[in-house]
Image (cartoon, rainbow, N blue to C red):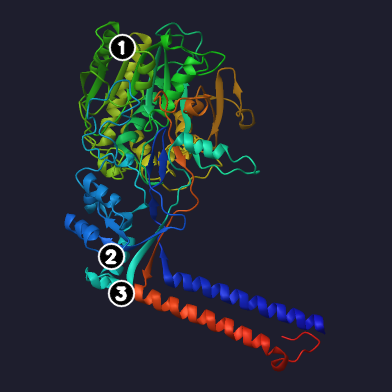
Amino acid sequence: MNLVLFSLCALHFLLNLISVSCERQDINALLYEKFDKAASCFRLLNGTHQFGCSSSVSGSLGVIHFIQNEHDIDWLINNAKAGPYMAVVPPKIFNQRNLMLELQSSKDISGILLAINGSSDRPEYFSPDDTCPNRYSGEGTCSEAWNPEGTSLLLVDWGKPMFVVKDPVVISKMHECFLKFNQPFDDSQIHKSLCSLQMKSHMHAAVDTPTCIRRSNSITFVFNPLSYCDGMGDKNIISTLEPIKKPDNRSILLFSTRLDTASMFDGVMLGAMSTMTGLVTFLATAKLLSSMLPANSSYERNVMFAMFNGEMYDYIGSGRTVYDITQNTFPKTSNPIGFEHIGLMVDVSQLSKSTQLYCHTKKMNNDVDLLTKDFCRSLETNAVKPVTVSTEVDEELPPSSVHPFLKKDKNIPAVVLANHAKQFINRYYNGLMDNASNIEYRYYNSSDIPEGSVQDALAKISTSLARSLYEWVTKKRYSGSEVVKPDIIDELLHCYLESRNCKIFKDANAPEEKLTADLTPLYVGVYKSVNPITKLTALTHVYFTGRDVNISESNCKSSVDDYSYYWISGQSGKGECKQTTVQLLKALSPAFEIDGYDWTSREYSTWSESVWQEMSLRMFLKPSGQQEMVTLIIGLVTLVLSFVTVYWLKSQAHLLFQIEVGVAC
């Protein structure tokens, strides 16, 4: 009987506990409104500094205040009394470096929210990168302002949290709450409950990369030591037209592009013109060139395709390749190449719907000049109308993957292909608004693609480039009729800019692989894991350039001699085996592997990313100071009364309670 009574009591207690838990969740939902579609700024470090944002450990709190002009900022910094505040700024304010630095330096501002309210909120320019990207890691002194619209906000240590919201519904909720509770904007705010935000994005790393690594390595007495930061990096995608067999000097053309972009905010890096137009043109050119040349051709010259990762952060991928070449381990230890084998390096940079192509070369006044100018002339001759090619002779080449190679060997002939002359025409370089609108892209989905579109322009540039590469390899003009079709460009841009669940990515993956429809940011991330977009791009390159072989699926998963084998869906969707030279090679800066490396030398990239636990943004109603004081006093009085009551009950327990044997509810 006692056991039954005890069980009933235990069940009653458990039901009460569940009820209290549910009530707590309901109360939490009533007090706070959490916004899941917000992206947070995070902290990065290099060999000497820290950059980016961080909240306090428990999160930073502040009263919402929408800013529309300089007057609002002046009131917030000099006259507001109910702080700290969360400054909600539109792109036109965020784009002004001096105003943003005023908010950053004010102790009354606890955080900043960038609110992008639809396409109508698009400023004329928006580039948070430097005026000379990768200023301190290039081959020269970076005397050119290649990116004139750059505000360098990427390189600011904000010392407070920062989020971006692009959902009009979320922005509307914040604005309604702001108007309802926070007006008028005067001293009366002190006596009212105010609409507020909590930003939580605490970063574990601080100071600089060597300090962070030293702190991480000092924790050795636990089984799972905490890492405060991780070196940035991923994988480079490397392949060749034909396997390399004891190459002659100057017999390899290194055809390259970058695979990543940069951003201040987590998960919102698209880089339509900054990166994707060049990447898509690169993939289409490689596809056409592979079909132009017969299989197992025995030409003296070869083309190496290289998609370098982490290039936006002091050339992580290309810098690693240069290091591996000096160590005689690139692309394979068994058959390495040296700088003397590179006859020409051609890097594909920013492109757009403009058919005016600039062939950038460096002024050398020697035989290198002749080699680079010969290629530019070949490109001009092979250009498909209306593409026109202009040769730009520069004192320093534009920011691109050629710089680490030229730092090591100035006599490597190098060419950079871009849509600009002395300054970027991309006014949103590495910015949040470098999206499909920036390149005027519209998905046609197998419909007729009009002339003058970005798809048409990139297809003709790819064809022109493939014919020039063909001429370099074979030493004769291409006489065939193969071209890059605009629908290939259309589908590739759709894959990278709109949905990874697209036809080309499906065909390039294994039949059982399921793809989601979300976007694929090109941020390089940390070296611990391969970025999904890197894997998808590598498989697309295999699909475009690999050769069909009659091998079953069970035998199509190994590497033999100089080739690798991939089982992909193919156009039929039933599966097919591709023979390829594609490799995924390390794109991690040697600075993280060289013992005693001088972190201030600038020889290699030193970027690392801070570790964080949680990023969240939520809105709540903050009580006035008077209300908080009343609540505190009531709480203290209740606490004192509780102690007195408990003491009295304990002292009178022998009179108030009778002790009975047994268990009762």
Q: Could you tell me the amino acid type at mark 1?
A: Arg
The residue carrying pointer 1 sits among few (fewer than 14), some (14 to 19) or many (20 or more) residues within 10 Å by Cα, namely some
**Local secondary structure at mark 3:** loop
Observer-nearest residue: 69 or 7? 69
Relative image position of residue 246 (x, y in whole percent): 50, 8
Q: Could you tell me the amino acid type at mark 3?
A: Lys
Q: Which mark is residue 175?
A: 2
Query: Which of pointers 3 and 2 indicates the residue nearer the eye?
Result: 3
Observer-nearest residue: 494 or 654? 654
Which residue lies at the image location 25% right of the left edge and 73% below the top edge?
Answer: 188
Relative image position of residue 504 (x, y in whole percent): 43, 37
Q: CA distance from mark 3 to mark 2?
A: 17 Å
The residue at which mark 1 appears reads as 477
Among the two numbered marks 1 and 2 on one chain, the one whose residue lies closer to the N terminus? 2
Relative image position of residue 303 (x, y in whole percent): 41, 16
Q: Is residue 534 visible?
A: no
